[in-house]
Image: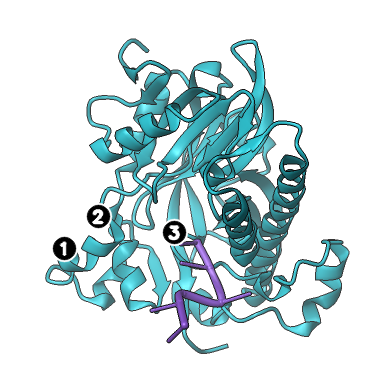
Chain colours: A cyan, B purple
Amino acid sequence: MGNSIRIPSDGVSVIAVDDTWIEGKAIQQLETTARLPGMHRVVGMPDLHPGRGYPVGAAFFSTNRLYPALVGNDIGCGMALWRTDIAAAKLNIDKLEKRLGSIDAPLDPAWNDVVAALDLPPTGHERALGTIGGGNHFAELQALDECYDDDAVARMGIDRRHLLLLVHSGSRGLGEAILRDHVARHGHAGLERGGADCAQYLDRHAQALRFARANRSLIAQRMLMRLRASGSTAIDVDHNLVAPAIVDGLAGWLHRKGATPSDAGPVVIPGSRGDYSYLVEPVADARSLYSLAHGAGRKWMRTECKDRLSARYSVAQLARTALGSRVVCDDRALIYEEAPEAYKSIDSVVAALRAAGLVRLLARLRPVLTYKTRECCE
DNA sequence: ATGTCC
């Protein structure tokens, strides 16, 4: 507890222990956000890393101004965990991979009724529904590897005999369009509470949250259909969003950018594709602005990954991981950018959260098959 | 992050 929450400067704190990898640039960006007008307090999570201007892996609480740029372009991005009926024993990964094929194309018209039942308002981005996107987005089959609270895990309907499916995706081009339109009109000055422009942004933001949740559900359903399996949602939690909140007795806006809510029940904190993920029960705590790390967090910039790894690993080697899992990623640049080496160790991130008393571990999940993108093969 | 830069 003692030194697991660092205070680099007034109004800025970072949840970290000695071996948490935190870049100086990310702290600088955090301090920049702390100086925005109306900003009350900012907290860096242990997966904090530099972003484009603003850091990723952080929560920001402001009183009178709302800052859409802090939420970023992927409004509503989050993690959905699905239970499946795929037997974990006697796994044939080749068969799973073959059945899965490519799920990058827009959904087939056969999905029209399923999409219509979601009752989403028209956005012009319907073609993106059911697709994962790029960057750090993925869909991953996982096995329950270690259980730390049998009763809690059983109550969630999760067991060792069946695989889980974790989907990390967001609002695709919709959130991007909403932020672009906002920045074109207001720059980075933010929006005054109560104004018409603020209300309009919040409307669009709500639309993006719905779209992103629907997208994760459709991705999971589409994968399960291909795998000739079925499943159900266990968790779906957003980590890029802004919401009204009361913090330190003040009413204001709680922005989360790559920060998972700690007041919305159990969540998964995923490691890289070659690392474990943890199912945790959060402890809602104002010190962390009711937030947790949303993953391991980048350690290397995307642009440096290929140079650092291409001599060490072939593309074929990168399709297998140290934990015995398979990676489907036909994008030559992305396979290096998302290599396990490019990410912090998930144990160091979770250790920092535990040291700060912010989570209780429920289970450790092991990756089995990570889907990023596939060029061909229905 | 992005129907990813014209």
Q: Position of residue A328 (x, y in %)?
A: 42, 73
Quadrant containing the N terminus of chain A is: top left
Q: Are marks 3 and 2 on the same chain?
A: yes
Q: Secondary structure at mark 3?
A: loop
Q: Which residue is mark 2?
A: A341
Cα distance, mark 3 to mark 2? 14 Å
Quadrant containing the C terminus of chain A is: bottom right
Say which amino acid is labelled 3: Asn
Say which amino acid is labelled 2: Glu
Q: Position of residue A314 (x, y in %)?
A: 21, 75
Q: Position of residue B5 (x, y in %)?
A: 45, 77
Q: Which residue is mark 3?
A: A136
Observer able to see residue A38: yes
Cα distance, mark 3 to mark 1? 19 Å
Question: Is the residue marked by circle 2 packed among few (<14), some (14-19), or many (20+) residues within 10 Å?
Answer: some
Left or right of A259, for residue A191 = right
Closer to the eye: label 3 or 2: 3
Say which amino acid is labelled 1: Arg
Precedes in sequence: disc 1 or disc 2: 1
Q: Quadrant of residue A316?
A: bottom left
Question: Is the residue marked by circle 3 packed among few (<14), some (14-19), or many (20+) residues within 10 Å?
Answer: some
Name the one closer to the observer, A8 or A153. A8
Observer able to see residue A92: no
x 39%, y 51%: residue: A52
Residue sticking out furthest to the bottom: A377
Precedes in sequence: disc 3 or disc 2: 3
Marks 1 and 2 close (CB-CB < 8 Å): yes
